[in-house]
Image (cartoon, rainbow, N blue to C red):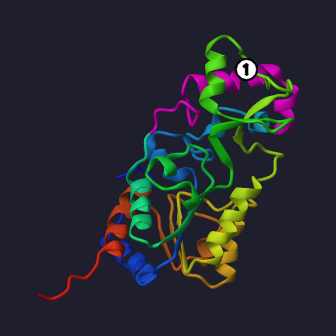
Amino acid sequence: MTPGHTRVVANDIDAAYEALTGKERILVFTGAGISTESGIPDFRGPQGLWTRVDPENFTIQKWFANAELRKERWRMHAEGLHWGARSQARPNRGHLAIADLHHAGLLSGVVTQNVDGLHLRSGLPEDAVAEVHGSVRTSSCLDCRNRWETEEVLRRVDAGEDDPHCPDCGGLIKTDVVMFGEALPLHERDKAWAFLSSSDSVLVVGSTVSVWPAADVVFRAANLALPIVIVNIGPTDADRFAAVKIDAAAGEVLPPLVARLTSRPTMPT
């Protein structure tokens, strides 16, 4: 059991199952809490990233202004630290259970605030995932918008280019992770709204539902009176809308819950 939260009991799973059973278009909204079980730190927890680094250093204004900060960030990615592009983190039981929902035809889509790409590595196709805060998998020139796989840029860092610039226009290059002060990627945002419009229920996993505008997906679902199940260690800003709230880790709850939701009654012989 993960320290600091209540042990999951059968009644919790029963209640979540009752709220979602019969639903055929479940939208899953995920945050950093689902990836902590893969060894990636969250942001706001007691051991979160913001306890070790200054959030002010994650603004787009600082990226433009501070070459040393850019060099430090590229080194982080090159060394595979945290949620960087070369992180060795692997999808955990929570990610895999969500992929099982998709394979069973019960998933409208995943809206994730995470940039680690673990939902895609769990077997979900790109058209089933809206990465509304971007991704470390790709990088772009901030001037001409040329785009590369981040690994291609990191090979230049490995070769000694500690602050890589665009080979075509000379502009700054940044991973496609949304920094403070940047807008959400339009294509990913549009996917999120499309998922919501076709959903009949929402499962929130590992998110405090406190970071806007991404959190608006959950609040709009509440306005639509969709049943909402929340699985998160600690309170969330959407608890008052939840049909069921389970204070537990995703890996404890999702595998048994999804197993029940995806089971098919056997026909009598």
Residue 111 visible within the image: yes
Query: What residue is shown with label 1?
Result: 71
User: Is residue 75 magenta-colored?
Assistant: yes
Question: Residue 211 in the image: x percent, y percent?
Answer: 71, 57
Judge by depth and name the residue closer to the eye, 104 or 228. Answer: 104
Residue at the spot x=66%, y=83% of the render?
224
Where's residue 196, x and y in %?
Answer: 63, 73
Residue 192 in the image: above or below residue 267 = above
Q: Which image quadrant for residue 135? A: top right
Residue 6 visible: no
Q: Residues within 10 Å of mark 1 (few under 14, many from 20)?
A: some
Residue at the outermost bottom position: 268
Task: Indicate the secondary structure of the residue bearing disc 1.
Answer: helix
Residue 230 percent across, percent down from the top left: 52, 68
Look at the picture and state if 199 lies above or below 126. below
The kind of residue on which mark 1 rests is Lys
Image quadrant for the C terminus? Answer: bottom left
Camera-side residue: 147 or 33?
147
Q: Residue at x 71, y 14 (%)?
A: 161
Establish if 54 lies above or below 236.
above
- Which range is magenta? 60-89
In the image, residue 263 sits, relative to residue 117, either above or below, namely below
Q: What predominant SS class does the magenta segment belong to?
A: helix
Based on the picture, tell me whether residue 221 belongs to the magenta stretch: no
Query: Percent from the top left, x then y, of residue 240?
Result: 61, 76
